[in-house]
Amino acid sequence: SLGETSVASIGVANQYFFLFNMALSGIVGGSGVFISQFYGKNDRINIKKTTSFTTLLSVGLSAIFVLLATLFPTNIINIFSKDPEVIKLCREYFSIIVFCYPLIAISTVFSMGSRSVRNPKLGMICSSIALVVNIILNYCLIFGNLGLPALGVKGAALATVLAQALATAFSLFFILSHRSIVKFERKYFIPNLKVSTSIISVGFSAFARNGASSLFALITNATLRSYGGTVSLTAFGTVNRIISFFFLPIMGINQGLQPIASYNYGAKQPDRIKQVVKLALIYTTIIGAIGSIVGILFPSTVINLFTKDKSLISEATFVLRLQLLFFWTIGLQMVASTFYQSLGKPIPSLFLSILRQFIILIPLILILPRYTSLGLNGVWYSFPISDFTAFVISALILWRAWHHLNKKSDDN
């Protein structure tokens, strides 16, 4: 084991990476929509232009993050931790891991582009290369196995950089080959304000969603610390791990929905868009309903898999039941946001992305515990209230868009 301090230092460094990943998602998410639409129109030139310019923006963004980390490492680390030992180890890890960012930018553009032209296997291969090689190199470089020196946290950082370099090499090899539809060309590496604004405006919903999640986590943890203490914080963390088992497949379905809907929007096939949205709604709602059933009927059974502490089980059981009560509504909320993003409609997509957490949930968490007699329970009751309210609003907005698609179908 690396030890608690070493693990904490890696966690602190990864907070900076999370900020980078949020910004990158705003660029890559928007370009994926346009690539899918151009693919639907069989417009290979604009696919090249979008891929090239997205690569330029992404690598440029990563260069800014590397430069800031190189010039002001201590200032950045101090934002996330004040522990001297954590700061020391974090600087060792940080000084190496930041050079992974340009590699991640290139491979992310490749994975997005492959998914956008309906070839997700290539992106999966790229991610798998990085994951498998990282695990092997971590085993060798952290602990000094197979005759290599034990480098500790530096080994962990070096393993990640080398694994990502290999995955990026695979990305570049395929992009530059004749088999790839997604290509970049030097003549298209031209800054273009109109194109960059379009890409970022559409992708901003993904950025805003991540930003809202970060703000939500900070506010919720602070509120729980004030009103409930360690048990409430631990219960919240345990419940979130359980919910992720149901949430991740829903998120995966939405990632699959985006390129298909964008492609058919570009190909002017509204009936196919309706079909794929229907399927996404059915499957995400089924997964959400399973989560709700588990949370309502078997909460203590599930919590017992994670802890045997009676006070924690009691608190987490109550929290899990409330958080999963309307979990069956989450699928529609995410599909509605992804649907608008797929059509290149930034305003409704942004609104739907931040509706539940930022517009409804965060204000409830700030208001109910402080200004009602609910106290800590005000935090927990905020979740089902925000879920159902966001569901009703999202359903109305999606119904309006659906009606518009029906008109397009009739016109065709």
Image (tube, rainbow, N blue to C red):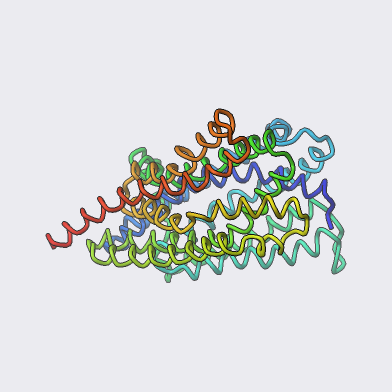
Residue 373, quarter of the rendered image: top right
Q: How many numbered discs, if any? A: 0
In the displayed orientation, state which residue is furthest to the front. Answer: 373
In this picture, is 375 found above or below 338? Answer: above
**122 and 226: which is toward the camera:** 226
Quadrant including the C terminus: bottom left
Image-based side of 381 in relation to 190, left or right: right
Say if residue 234 shows up in the picture: yes
Residue 307, quarter of the rendered image: bottom right
Image-based side of 353 in relation to 87, left or right: left
Look at 46% across and 59% down and name the residue there. 328
Look at 73% across and 45% down and name the residue there. 231
Q: Position of residue 273 (x, y in %)?
A: 29, 63
Look at 51% across and 36% down and name the residue there. 364
**9 and 294: which is toward the camera:** 294
In this picture, is 68 found above or below 160? Answer: above
Say if residue 57 shows up in the picture: no
Q: Where is residue 67 in the image (x, y as percent from the top left)?
A: 62, 37
Q: Where is residue 140 in the image (x, y as percent from the top left)?
A: 80, 64
Look at 50% across and 68% down and name the residue there. 122
Quadrant including the N terminus: bottom right
In this picture, is 358 found above or below 327? Answer: above
Image-based side of 249 in relation to 400, left or right: right
